[in-house]
Image (tube, rainbow, N blue to C red):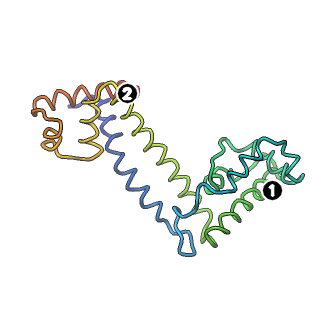
Amino acid sequence: MAKDYEQAVIKQLQEYRRIVARMKVLEKYPIGNGMSLNVVNEDDKLQELHRQLRGLPTYMYLTKREQQLESVAHAYLTRYPAGTRSQLASVPPSGADAEDEKLLRELRGKIEKVIEARAGHLDDFEAAIERISELQDLEQQKQYIEHTLKVFEEYKPQYARLLWLQYIEDKPIDDVVSELRIVRRTFGRWRSKALEEYGKLIGMS
């Protein structure tokens, strides 16, 4: 019976294919006007303008009301993503008091207008935001697994390759053995060591 950490490692690696599949489904999620999530551009000229303005004091280019919105954004946003759809997902639904909640609603409204201007009317913002958030979380999980395997490859290339072929590409053992140019006995030994080393790398063993 596999050790607990081996089962945990296998589960994480096998999850990669489900993550990728779910992301593909979410990217085609309809948001109205014949559009889907993946057409809401993450990067545009507004972002470049914002980067240029960052070097100036905000009072030089923001109205008093806009400065209030900026202040509440700094207070409640834990991160500052680049694209408008990511920004919308980052705005919390509630604030500490009525005035903050009013400002947060206004902030969400302004971001929504930018998205509507690009993609047309969205059928259901809340549903879209939930899926955007899920898509972001899945992307982070996907990148984590890819990064970990890349780091693993730097010092244990044969083990990393074995895990990639068997669990990420979901290839049969015979195909993995053939690509690695090893025999089944060696495969069994490498696989056990690969799971152990990967488990150590992510703190599971």
Of residues 124 and 74, the one drawn nearer to the viewer in this rendering: 74
Q: Which badge, 2 or 1, comes first in the chain's sequence?
A: 1
Residue at position x 78%, y 59% in the image: 106
Q: Secondary structure at mark 2?
A: loop
Q: Secondary structure at mark 1?
A: helix
Q: Quadrant of the C terminus?
A: top left
Of residues 111 and 3, the one drawn nearer to the viewer in this rendering: 111
Residue at position x 17%, y 27% in the image: 189
The picture places residue 164, in percent across and down from the top left corner, at 28, 40
Q: What residue does disc 2 label?
A: 204
The picture places residue 110, in percent across and down from the top left corner, at 74, 61
Crowd band around label 2 with a 10 angstrom C-alpha radius: few (<14), some (14–19), many (20+): some
Identified by mark 2, the residue type is Met
The image quadrant of residue 84 is: bottom right
Q: Quadrant of the N terminus?
A: top left
Q: What residue does disc 1 label?
A: 102
Residue at position x 42%, y 61% in the image: 25
Of residues 123 and 58, the one drawn nearer to the viewer in this rendering: 58
Asked if residue 189 is positioned above or below residue 37 in the image, the reply reads above
Of residues 51 and 62, the one drawn nearer to the viewer in this rendering: 51
Identified by mark 1, the residue type is Lys
Q: In the picture provided, is 81 more to the left or to the right than 149?
A: right
Residue at position x 55%, y 56% in the image: 132
Q: How many marks?
A: 2
Q: CA distance from mark 2 to mark 1?
A: 45 Å
Which numbered disc covers residue 181?
none
The picture places residue 195, in percent across and down from the top left corner, at 28, 30
The picture places residue 98, in percent across and down from the top left corner, at 82, 52
Crowd band around label 1 with a 10 angstrom C-alpha radius: few (<14), some (14–19), many (20+): some
